[in-house]
Image (spheres, rainbow, N blue to C red):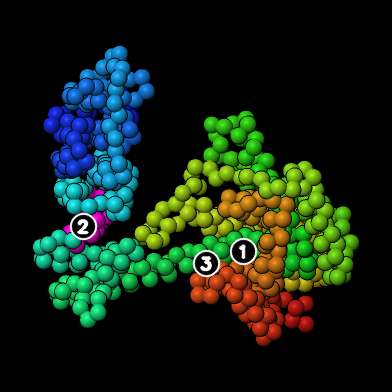
Amino acid sequence: MAAWGIAACAFALPPEAVSHIAFGDNDAKLSAIDELVGRGDLSALPLLQGLLDGEVQTIGADRVLLVKGDTAVDAVSGQAVTPVPEGRDDVVVNNRLRRALATGIAALRLAAPEREVRLAAAKELRNSADDAALPAIAGALTKESDPEVRGLLALTQASIELASPDRATRIGAVRALAASDTGATKTLLTALLERRGNVYVEPDAEIRAAAERSLRAVDQRLLTGEILARIFSGISLGTILLLAALGLAITYGLMGVINLAHGELIMIGAYATYVVQNVFRLHAPAAFDLYPIVALPFAFAVSAGVGILLERTVICHLYGRPLETLLATWGLSLLLIQGVRTIFGAQNVQVENPNWMSGGFEIMTNVVLPWSRVVIIGFTACIVVALWLLLTRTRLGLFMRAVTQNRPMAGALGVRTPRVDMLAFGLGSGIAGLAGCALSQIGNVGPDLGQSYIVDSFMVVVLGGVGQLVGTVYAALGLGLVNKFIEAWQGAVLAKIAVLVFIIIFIQKRPQGLFALKGRTVEA
């Protein structure tokens, strides 16, 4: 709160209220605060905020100053006081006054021109308002045009009016609370239906009946919010599994390579993102929020390059030998982990979210969608579409599908299968790098990052059907949703066990997965 802000706003305050706030007892202070809040005048904000922040001081028996640093302003006239007088006394504020001040400041901010300020004030009042804020809330309701702010204010008003001695006011408040979606409202309504012995806490039968109807509506809304939250969490988990499994679906589906180093390719993509972040922080701090846009192609290129190197030097010599391939890729994964530990250290590194991926937006009181998760869901959808277009609309995609369905025939028709293998492995590795870039925005980045996703990736690929992009999408989203709903019911550990048991039983009954791969070699 700058001194110029005080001078611009404080001159309209009534001297009696300022005097009571500075020199009166606690009851007088509370009455003066209620008077200023009831006026609904923004000119009271600097004084109330200064009182809350310990910036209101007195000189003698009649002068009140708002002092901040080396500047002072007279609380009544708004005139700057220079030099700042000596011998000032602080105005003491206890916890009771602090609560009243916080509520009053929030009530006055309802008249602010900025929507974000009014929304924040309405949310604060929802949890702390009392009847002293009713005039300001009522005044704000007559002027407020934003539906979200109006809804919060209406519910806050109803919560306060629930304690009114007037029966009609209380019934109206109970009915208005039916539009709420907060647990606190449920607590208020439940209290009206409680019994002490054989006597209801609320003696009025009509109010109890209205409370029962409102409580059912609130319960339904809360249940809807919980279901929406679980669906979003399931889709979010599913997209993470899909990101981790997409690259594996290409390499495993095309070449039959059980690549246990796939998780480490994800880890390399995450570390590539970390490197780009540090470059931006050191050399282009003003453009820091743009670093993920640069990190995406860089992570893809680095992981794809490492994947092609592994395929050309080791894996290409082991085609058709699954056990040796499994052992070799496991060894490669250990080498990659140790290499990262040598370069970056064994501790996790920090990758920060840009501002546009921080925070979230609230669709219901109990449902907040983080922007980072929303962006990753959209990013995954873009990758799936791009991969589908590549496989179905490009020459490389045609060759990859031909080699997947019948490698000998594709080779006989002139397809250079070793080159297709190399490019396919590089593509799958690059997509793993993109997954690492995305995962760096929602979790820790460390040498063991890939180990957390390799088993889940194989489960998704096997369940969806080897070599089937659509099957991988369905399997990842399905596993994510099932996992989150079971987790809400029985906990995370039992959810993992249940999903694993389901996959084992499913594969026993349908070894080809959700979608069977078609082709002469497969059908032979």
**Alpha carbon distance from label 1 to label 3:** 10 Å
Q: Residue at x 56, y 36 (%)?
A: 288
Give the side of residue 226 with respect to residue 428, left or right.
left
**Mark 2 residue element:** helix
**Mark 3 residue element:** helix
**Alpha carbon distance from label 3 to label 2:** 37 Å
Looking at the image, is mark 3 or mark 2 earlier in the sequence? 2
Q: Nearer the viewer, residue 124 or 102?
A: 102
Judging by the rendered image, the residue that carries numbered circle 1 is: 241
Looking at the image, is mark 1 or mark 3 earlier in the sequence? 3
The residue range painted magenta reads: 145-162
Q: Residue at x 20, y 78 (%)?
A: 199
**Amino acid type assigned to the residue bearing label 3 in the image:** Gly
Image coordinates for residue 88, horizontal then vertical, percent: 29, 22
**Amino acid type assigned to the residue bearing label 1 in the image:** Leu
**Amino acid type assigned to the residue bearing label 2 in the image:** Ile
Quadrant containing the N terminus in the rendered view: top left
Quadrant containing the C terminus in the rendered view: bottom right
Q: Nearer the viewer, residue 505 or 385?
A: 505
Looking at the image, is mark 2 or mark 1 earlier in the sequence? 2
Task: Look at the numbered discs 1 and 3 and tell me whether their residues touch, using CB distance below 8 Å.
Answer: no
Judging by the rendered image, the residue that carries numbered circle 3 is: 234
Judging by the rendered image, the residue that carries numbered circle 2 is: 160
**Alpha carbon distance from label 2 to label 1:** 46 Å
